[in-house]
Structures are given as C-alpha cells and as structure tokens.
Amino acid sequence: MTPSPSPLTLSALQAGQPVLWASGADRSGAAGPAFNGISNADVDGSVARLARFAPLLARLFPELEDSAGTIESSLLPVPRLQQALELPTAQGLLLVKADHALPVAGSIKARGGIHEVLEYAESVALQNGLLPEGQASDYRLLATPSARLAFGRYKVAVGSTGNLGLAIGVMASALGFQAVVHMSSDAKQWKKDRLRRRGVEVVEHAGDYAQAVAAGRRAADADPQCHFVDDEQSLSLLLGYAAAAPHLARQLAALGRPVDAEHPLFVYLPCGVGGAPGGIAFGLAQIYGPHVHCFFAEPTRSPCFLVEMLAGTPLLAHLGAHPSVYDVGQDNRTEADGLAVPRASELAAEVVKPFIGGVYTVEDDTLFRDLHTAAATEGLRIEPSAAAGLAGPAMLLGSEAGRAYLRRHGLDTHMAAATHIAWTTGGLFVPEEEYARFHARGAAMAQTA
Ligand SMILES: *Cc1c(COP(=O)(O)O)cnc(C)c1O
C-alpha cells in the first residue's frame, strides 16, 4: 500500500520521491555507556526531575490528577492497523506509542518542552529561595502566590512551528512565567489562538521556521531574565525526550515483548529538527544497545535530518557541512507542520549518528492516507506529522537498502519475533474542523490507492 521507495539518489531527493537511507555504521558501539559527553545518568536526571515536579503538575493541571502528575502515553497493540498497512505477522508485531494523546500539550513536545521549562523553573526557584535547600522539597510550594509572583519576573521564550510553542507556552504560563512564542507565518492559526487565550504572547515572523528561531534567539539574548528554549541546540529538551525510554521499556516488558539479538526492536520516529527522535533514540540505545533500531521519518519535502546524515558522503559531496533541504532542491512545503524544518539540529545529529538505524521520507499523500487508516481501523486521532512513523515497516522491508540493513545485522532471520513501534507524535488538540479536513483528504487517498 505504501508507495515503494526509490533508490537513494540526488534526483530522487530533488523529485521528492520516498527514499530510505540505512546507516552503514558499526552499531556495536550503541551499547556504550556514554555518547558525546551525555550519559545514562543524564537520562536518570530528567526522569527524576519529572518525578519531583509530578505533585505540582497534578495540582496545576486537572487532567493529570489520575496519573498523579505523570505525563505519559499508552503503548497500543494495533492488529487491524497492522493488517491494513500490510505488515505480515511473519515480519513482527506492530505497536503504536500513542504520544498523539499526551495530556497538557497534545504532542510529543509534552516530553522535551515541558522538561526544559521545569528545569528552568527549578533553577529560578533555587536562586530565589523558593524551595528550602538540602532536603526533599514539596514542589507544590511553587504553586503558591509568592512563588508565582517571583516566576512572573522571568520570561520563557521559544521559536516554534506550533507544537513546541504550545508545550512551552502552556507550561510556562501555568507556572506564572511570562511566555513568548515566536512563530513562522506558516504556523496554524488555531495554535496561535490557543496560546493567546492562555495569555502567551505570540510573535509572528515572515519566513520559515529557522528564521523564527533565530529571531527569537536574538530577542532573548538581549534579556538576562529571559530563558530561550533553543530547539536546535538544547540538551535539556533532548534529555526530556530521552526520559520516554525507561517508561517504554517497562511497557514493552508488561506486554511480554523481549528485546535482544533474537528479538529486535524497530522504532519509527517522526523527525523535525531531530531533538525528539534523537532524545528517544538515545534513551533507548542506553537500554537496549545494538538491539534497538531507530528510523527517523521525514516529509519528502523537508528531509533535513536525511541530508544532515548524508553530508560529506559522495551523494552530497558538492555541499558543505550542515546542509539544508533547500540545498538539495527541496522547498520545505508540507502539511506535516511539526516536521517542516529546513535544517537539522547539529546536537541531535551528533548524538545519534553512531547508532541511528536510518532515515526515510514520506509523501504528504501517504501521511494523509495513513492518518485516515489509523482512524478507520483503530480509532486513533492523529495529525499528519504523527502518521510518518506508520510507513516505517513498509519502507524498511520494501527497500533494497532496508533489506540489506537487515541482512547486514543478521536480523532477517529474526523478523517473526521483531517488534515494530510507530510513534504517533501529535493530534489531541487539533480542532475538529481541521481534523475533519485531514480525514477527508486521507479517505480520498485510500480510495484511489
Ligand atoms: C516536533 C514534532 C516532531 C519532531 O520533533 P523534533 O524534535 O522537531 O524532531 C514530530 N511530530 C510532531 C507532531 C511534532 O510536533
């Protein structure tokens, strides 16, 4: 059902054909304790921080009462979707990691974005003596009027195509910070409206996402009381995303899905700048070493992480380091607004390069078709960006590059025992009218397929 991938050539990239690149790296290093100066201890640190804040979050957000302040998503068996996507059970079991329903932010940004705001809040609180030092504090103290007044003297700013802005803006304003979100002109109107209703200042910029980030960074640099969440360089974001990994490992264990040399795990992660998939891939590599294979999924017209991985290889030898999608003749125009990014995060690229499984691209038509299929088969309400992971198994098994990867790592004989996880990264807060339009477009695609 998914269109067959084209061989990876410059003309296929330029023409916007779906392609898969598989890493040729020796992935045995994926079991190492630390990459690029960050380690498992840092992931533990972000897990612990989220736990410290949970009682406060349960107080600030009624929707978190039932989970006692934990922001997490389900890991769902999806047999009807697996069948509709034509993934035979002889090739493994498909699961969906349902971040499209994450509370508070409605997308995967609830992980990294909220973590970074909390880390900043913690440092401001300690600086201002809002938390008694040297003992396990009750973070609910930070909801008191005096703490909120103190937070109100500080500002949190971010540049975003939408979802990151939603996560940062909502959490920052809930704590009492001033919040500013710089958005590119192509960001969806409903996201701007939702933020403004929460008292967040929205600054609109002509130009693309990277330009909105740059403008936001400049404005924040001039203000010492302002923390800028830098999607292209932030370690705090990356480690917030990585905190998903230990929780996922418990969910896999609860479903009785082992992960080892005979039971490989494939994870398909929608990718914008690469922070979210990079952090998660890092966290999973800490747990499963070379037995987890993370593939990043991008729109054919915004393949920024793919070109970053290919920089310096013969295919892109004519380009310098850190190329953009424009450099390969692409235009960054996609309905997958969470993934519409022209240039990858160098931090994320550097972190994952030694162990990433690969990157593939998906046409918008396929995103809409899979969005519809997920709704029709399993009742999942996802946004176009979030559908990019669903094409993963077909791209891996249907491409020569993917099959060669499986043979190279001795995985082809273990596929019946494999687990495939498509990470559905957003959707909860898409307004009904907009979702209906997505769904109708996908239904039309499914009919013509
Ligand atoms: C932001 C986002 C992603 C990708 O995250 P990056 O850190 O930009 O790679 C994927 N899906 C959705 C819905 C998002 O909002």
Image (spheres, helix red, strand yellow):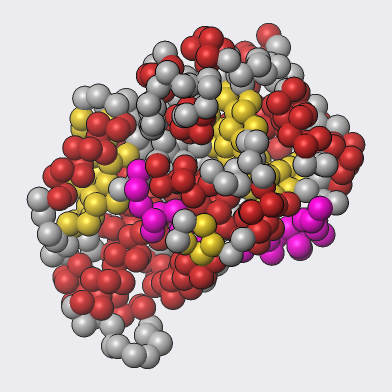
- Location of residue 158 in the rendering, given as x and y in whole percent from the top left corner: 27, 46
User: At x 49% / y 49%, what residue is drawn?
Assistant: 351
Q: Is residue 122 above or below residue 426?
A: below
Quarter in which the N terminus is drawn = top right
User: At x 37% / y 19%, what residue is drawn?
Assistant: 326
Q: Is residue 39 above or below residue 325?
A: below
User: At x 85% / y 37%, what residue is drawn?
Assistant: 412
Q: Quick one: 444 or 407, which is closer to the camera?
A: 407
Q: Main secondary structure of the magenta part?
A: helix
- Location of residue 319 in the rendering, given as x and y in whole percent from the top left corner: 40, 22
User: At x 47% / y 61%, what residue is drawn?
Assistant: 38
Q: Quick one: 130 or 280, which is closer to the camera?
A: 280
Whether residue 430 appears in this view of the structure is no
259 magenta-colored: yes
The magenta segment is 232-261
Left-right relation of 39 to 249: left
- Location of residue 414 in the rendering, given as x and y in whole percent from the top left corner: 87, 43
Q: Quick one: 236 or 156, which is closer to the camera?
A: 236
- Location of residue 240 in the rendering, given as x and y in whole percent from the top left corner: 46, 58
Corner quadrant of residue 396: top right
Corner quadrant of residue 94: top right
Corner quadrant of residue 402: top right
Left-right relation of 148 to 223: right
- The extreme left residue here reads 222
Quarter in which the C terminus is drawn = top right
